Image: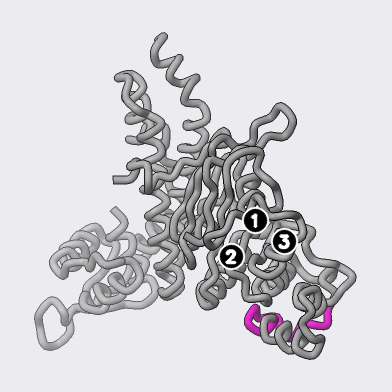
Amino acid sequence: MIIEAREVGRSYGSTVALREANLSVAAGEVVAIMGPSGSGKSTLLHCLAGIFTPDSGEVWFDGRRLDTLDDGRRSELRRTAFGFVFQFGQLVPELTAADNVMLPLLLGRTRRKDAERRAAEWLERLELADLGGRRTGELSGGQAQRVAIARALVTRPRVVFADEPTGALDTLTGEHVMDLLVGLAREEGATVILVTHDARVAACADREVVVRDGRVSDPYTTGAVR
Amino acid sequence: MTVPLALLGLLEREPSHGYDLKRDYDTFFGRGKPLPFGQVYSTLGRLARDGKVTGQSEPGGGPDRKRYAITPLGRQEVATWLAEPVAAEPYLQTVLFTKVVLALMLGRDAAGYLDAQRATHMRRMRELTEVKRGGPLTDALLADHAMFHLEADLRWIDVTQARLGALAEMVRTS
């Protein structure tokens, strides 16, 4: 398993978001986390990605405890081993598409020339070769999400975390974005963990789990699927 | 039910022999279930009897030597059919609803059934997603149609799952 949540619990004040949540994801797998609003699915994703620290339980990544790492080590891991695609707000609208894609490379001290070359390659793979010089604030929703995917994959992450990546897009645009995200992640051998309430998006994954009232129900391991 | 109307529609496009009609039907509407030749000719026979097509014999004999053309009556039937929306299916009468209510009545695991049904629907959604990835546009559009229907069922499954406690209470007390 590349990443695992073991009996993870997390509360916000008196509100329990996750209760003894378990999830194991194999390397290269694409897994969708589904569930109603407020069920705890995004909290689970954030715990797996080391953004939130669980109140109880353990998170393991590639044979190492993630939840006990200090903030600095976790930030480094997020920058080097993880990629993120969210519904909104991850791109800097004043920067160009190419600058946005380069950002994680420059933060990781890649030389500017190399960063520019790799950003250009990824923009091309995301069918955005002509838009590298445009500010992301001027792009359509689908184009902006493709820039976000390029930015998530440019560091060649082991795991890509995506939280409602098509939530703001129409059906056909969302489908195109998902095809690119899953197709390119597979080409790169990256694992994808995807939060969505949309069954069509979840159908792009290898399997899905459902979070209800903070508990993870996995029909493929509980015997619900015969 | 749709075979006669589909054949009429193909004939409105252009007059054809039975063989060509079968080939076009299989290409556009067959989806792995080819139309038997016997059904093509018996359907054309009924349409001719009802005045919706005419069959013009050509030299050489045999059923394949008959060229069929749509009549004004046939055209009218196609126009009416295409203008009419299909009746919305009464989803709440479906087998899903019956199974959930019966499971609750009998004290069985309705939530487990819904989970299993959900997973089965999702598995089919994944298969259809694959069809869309590799296939021609006609296959992709048919897969989309099936997926939107499955999605409606999935939303119903989720809502029912959330209301299972209230439904169980109602089933037990009525």
> Left or right: where does residue A92 sit relative to residue A159?
right
What residue did someone put label 3 on? A73
Q: Residue at x 57, y 46 (%)?
A: A58
What residue did someone put label 2 on? A159
Q: Secondary structure at mark 2?
A: strand
Residue numbers of the magenta segment: A123-134
Where is residue B50 drawn, in percent x and y?
24, 57
Instruction: From the viewer's side, name the closer residue of A177 and A83.
Output: A83
Where is residue A94 drawn, in percent x and y?
89, 70
Looking at the image, how many numbered discs can be counted on the residues? 3
Location of residue B123 (image quadrant): bottom left
Instruction: From the viewer's side, name the closer residue of B101 and A210.
Output: A210
Where is residue A96 drawn, in percent x and y?
84, 77
**Disc 3 to disc 1, C-alpha distance:** 13 Å
Whether label 2 touches label 3, CB < 8 Å: no
Same chain letter for marks 3 and 1: yes
> Left or right: where does residue B43 sit relative to residue A185?
left
Relative to residue B168, is residue A114 depicted above or below? below
Task: Name which residue type carries label 2.
Answer: Val
Packing grade of label 1 (10 A; few <14, some 14-19, many >=20) is: many
Whether label 1 touches label 2, CB < 8 Å: yes
Residue occupying the far right of the picture: A94
Nearer-N-terminus badge (3/1): 1
Magenta region includes residue A132: yes
Where is residue B170 drawn, in percent x and y?
45, 15
Location of residue A110 (image quadrant): bottom right
Nearer-N-terminus badge (2/3): 3
Q: Residue at x 70, y 67 (%)?
A: A145
What residue did someone put label 1 on? A49
**Disc 2 to disc 3, C-alpha distance:** 16 Å
Q: Residue at x 86, y 67 (%)?
A: A93
Packing grade of label 3 (10 A; few <14, some 14-19, many >=20) is: few
